């Protein structure tokens, strides 16, 4: 076995923190390799060779390099099953907890927005009529529109001022 798993990123990122937590919980030997986010080191080489999307975290275990896109790709099957459950639930109620917008919906926003706007998997939602309508209702909320704009600048910084 070759050395510690390397995690490229900064602990302030919730995605990095989640990976670190998994490694801690499993007792894996790991090393956090910080990037200078202020200097946009994640968007330059050699990081772009690790993750062409220029994101953190990236996990390197010997010859294996994993970034979230790979994790998403590998878990599409699981996500489809979860979305089928949502589809059935949302056939009887407008929102997850009932016919009212609640924390249950709100907590889905960040990661679902990322899936729709930042990956090629938007069709997973679009192909499910009730899930798609639910997402439309969420996206129509003024609060969501405002926050989505902020996220969009983050996902596509080149379009920001
Ligand atoms: N988990 C997703 C998202 C990761 C993510 O958005 N990381 C942010 C930090 S929390 C990042 O790398 N931002 C830097 C950038 O986009 O340039 C992925 O790896 O694709």
Image (spheres, helix red, strand yellow):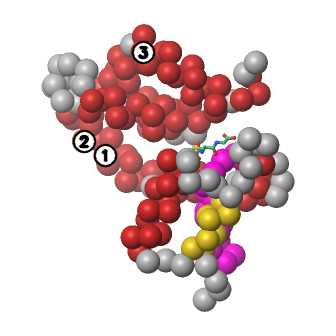
Please say if the residues under marks 1 and 3 sit with CB atoms less than 8 Å apart.
no
Who's the residue at 77% across and 52% down the image?
48
* Secondary structure state at the residue bearing disc 2: helix
Residue occupied by mark 1: 82
Is 33 covered by the magenta stretch?
Answer: no
Q: CA distance from mark 1 to mark 3?
A: 26 Å
Find residue 98 and report its horizontal and vertical position in percent: 16, 25
Q: Nearer the viewer, residue 113 or 7?
A: 7
Please say if the residues under marks 2 and 3 sit with CB atoms less than 8 Å apart.
no
In the picture, the disc for residue 85 is: 2
Q: CA distance from mark 2 to mark 3?
A: 26 Å
Local packing at callout 1 (Cα closer than 10 Å; few below 14, some 14-19, many 20+) is few
* Secondary structure state at the residue bearing disc 1: helix
Find residue 3 and report its horizontal and vertical position in percent: 64, 83
Residue occupied by mark 3: 143
Asked whether the viewer can see residue 33, the reply is yes
Name, please, the residue furthest toward the bottom: 1
Who's the residue at 58% across and 39% down the image?
119
Instruction: Between label 2 and label 3, give the one nearer the viewer.
Output: 3
Say above or below: 132 vs 80. Answer: above
Quarter of the rendering occupied by the C terminus: top right
Instruction: Between label 1 and label 3, give the one nearer the viewer.
Output: 3
Find residue 89 and report its horizontal and vertical position in percent: 20, 33
Give the total number of marks visible in the rendering: 3
Please say if the residues under marks 2 and 1 sit with CB atoms less than 8 Å apart.
yes
Q: Quick check: 30 left or right of 43?
A: left
Residue range (magenta): 52-67
Is 55 covered by the magenta stretch?
Answer: yes
């Amino acid at each position: 076995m070759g050395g510690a798993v390397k995690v490229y990123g900064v602990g302030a990122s919730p995605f990095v923190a989640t990976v670190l937590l998994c490694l801690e919980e499993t007792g894996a030997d790991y090393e956090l390799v910080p990037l200078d986010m202020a200097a946009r080191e994640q968007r330059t080489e050699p990081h772009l060779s690790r993750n062409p999307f220029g994101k953190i975290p990236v996990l390197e275990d010997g010859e294996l390099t994993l970034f979230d896109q790979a994790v998403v790709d590998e878990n599409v099957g699981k996500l489809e099953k979860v979305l089928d459950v949502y589809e059935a639930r949302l056939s009887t109620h407008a929102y997850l907890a009932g016919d009212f917008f609640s924390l249950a919906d709100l907590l889905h926003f960040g990661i679902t927005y990322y899936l729709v706007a930042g990956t090629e998997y938007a069709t997973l939602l679009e192909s499910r009529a009730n899930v798609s309508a639910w997402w439309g209702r969420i996206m129509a909320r003024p609060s969501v529109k405002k926050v989505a704009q902020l996220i969009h600048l983050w996902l596509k910084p080149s379009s920001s001022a």
